[in-house]
Each structure stands twice: as C-alpha cells, then as structure tokens.
Image (spheres, grey):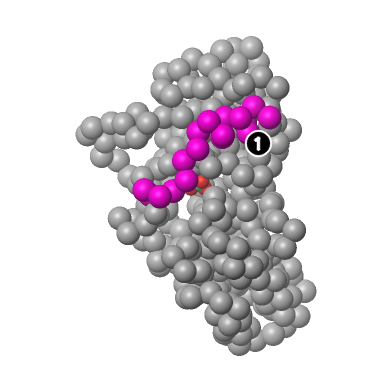
Amino acid sequence: MNAPIVADSVAALRVQVRNWRLAGLRVAMVPTMGALHDGHISLVRIALERADRCVVSIFVNPTQFAPTEDLDRYPRQLTRDLERLREAGAHLAFTPSVAEMYPTGFATKISVGGPSSGLETDFRPNFFDGVATVVAKLFLQAAPDCAVFGEKDYQQLCVVRQLCRDLDLPVEIVGAPTVRDAHGLAMSSRNAYLGDAELDIARQLNAILRRTAAALSAGADEADAIEDATKAVISVGFRKVDYVAARASVTLEPWQQNRNGRLLAAAWLGTTRLIDNVEIPSA
Ligand code: PAF
C-alpha cells in the first residue's frame, strides 16, 4: 500500500479532496484522536468499502477534555499511526495543529441537545460541546460524503447523527460495531493506561453488561438489574461506577421494556475511566 498523503492544513486538505471530487470519487472520513488500534482500523476498512478515498483525521481535540482529564498524557504516536494507515490503505491523514483548528480568536461552540443529555454529560459536562464543535469543523473542512464512527462511543455516535440532522450537514453517518479483544474488552486508546491486573478486571465489564442486557430483555425489573450490574462491576475490582443505564437506542431517552435499547456504562479502574455498551434486544 502507498503511504497516505499527510495534510496538516485545512487548505491542503481541501485541495486534495476537491481534486478527488473533480475526478468523480466518493470520499469517506474517519475522525480520530490517533493512537490508532484495531478498532480504528476497522473503521478505515468500512470507510474503504463505502467510498473511493478515505481521509483519517488525527487530532487530540483539547476542547473535549476537562482541565482535570488526561489531555496531556493522552497517547500520541503519529509515526506509528501513519504506518498503520498505510497498511490499512487510507489515502490521506489530516493532522492539524491546535492552532490550525482553533486559531487565536476562535469563539464558536456547537451544543447539541437530545441524545447528549445525561450519561457522559452528567460527568463530563463540556465533552459533547467539544466533540460536536470539532466534528462539525472536520466535516466542513473535508466535506466527506460519509463518516464512520465506532459504536464503542455510542452516545457520541447518537450525538453526531443528531448534529448532522439538525444542521443539515450532508454527511452520511455510519455506525461501526465495537472491536473487542478475545476476552470481550472493547478496544480503546485508553487501554494503554492499564497494567495486566487491571486488564483482567476491565475484561469483565462487557460480560456483566451482556448478562444484564439479557436479563432486561427477559423481563427483569430495570432498577434491580441496574443495581445488580453496578454491584457486580464494583465487586470485580472497578473503583467507581459513573453509570450503568438502559436507554432507547436512537434518542437515548429512558428505555421501555420490550423495546430495542442500549445498556451503557462508564466505570473507573484506578485513574482510568472506561466506557462500554451493548444492545438490549427487544424480547
Ligand atoms: O471519538 C473520538 O476519537 C473523538 O471524540 C472524535 C470523534 C475524533 C472527536 O475528537
């Protein structure tokens, strides 16, 4: 495979995408914060199935981190990321600086309602404003036909769909299944923070969620099932549970029995916060 073109300015990105469009090619985008793992590569593969050219953005977006969060220690490994993109066949890596994305005087924020309320927002109040603002900018900069987001960040996927619907952004949003290791642990750049003992604990989160989703589908009382799941997460070794919650799969409003839904969780393992989610199939 050829190495991807690397564009670090909006102008260079636009020239390249315009040339592809003039040639009649369809363009897909995969927005990332780098530290690419197999989950990201699966998004690139899906993008390549749906378009002729794939743009991957690598930008650790400061506006979606709270001052107490891990912006400084978030893994950055551009050389390795570019090699992974070459192997995967991505065509362009967009690697803007913070100054390119947020030049002096930048003063706009996009705030999405609906699915952004609750869950992550209860614990990271500015997170989705940061995500929505940067994703809107990336879409306006790259003007892709479609963009692929992982279901691992399920609430983010719902928020991005809402953003595009509400602002008439002409980008088809494609949700991609979560990639997991052999033990069910969802791939995440933050897994790099975990030692072996913590990985063993982290690997139990998904099994607890699957068990709970199955119980809910089978008619278990929702409050009891959520309480049992929360206790189980703590008992396997997590330090703190931010939430375990059953929601409607598109709106993320409260889940109703016998409807298709999503069970979402966020929990702390030491100083690392992990999220995961599974489907609650309708009975
Ligand atoms: O999911 C991520 O990696 C980020 O939230 C995103 C969508 C690239 C925006 O910075």
Q: Is residue 262 above or below residue 98?
A: below
Residue 129 in view (yes/no): no
Give the percent coordinates (x, y) of residue 12: 45, 17
Residue 279 in view (yes/no): yes
Q: Is residue 153 above or below residue 247?
A: above
Image quadrant where one finds the N terminus: top right
| Closer to the camera in the image, 14 or 5 | 5
Residue at (54, 60) in percent of width and height: 194
Q: Secondary structure at mark 1?
A: helix
Asked where in the image residue 62 lies, by quadrant, the reply is top left
Crowdedness of circle 1 by 10 Å Cα count: few (<14), some, many (20+)? many
According to the image, label 1 marks what residue? 44
Image quadrant where one finds the C terminus: bottom right
Residue at (71, 76) in percent of width and height: 211
Asked where in the image residue 172 lies, by quadrant, the reply is top right
Residue at (68, 29) in percent of width and height: 87
Q: Is mark 1 within 8 Å of ligand 1?
A: no
| Left or right: 34 as drawn, with respect to 129 | right
| Closer to the camera in the image, 92 or 17 | 92
Q: Is residue 87 above or below residue 181?
A: above
Residue at (37, 31) in percent of width and height: 97
Give the percent coordinates (x, y) of residue 47: 67, 35
Give the percent coordinates (x, y) of residue 153: 56, 55
| Closer to the camera in the image, 245 or 187 | 187
| Left or right: 180 as drawn, with respect to 197 | right
Question: Which residue is most to the front?
Answer: 196
Whether residue 129 is in magenta: the answer is no
The part of the chain drawn in magenta is 71-87
Q: Is residue 127 above or below residue 83?
A: below
Give the percent coordinates (x, y) of residue 233: 58, 77
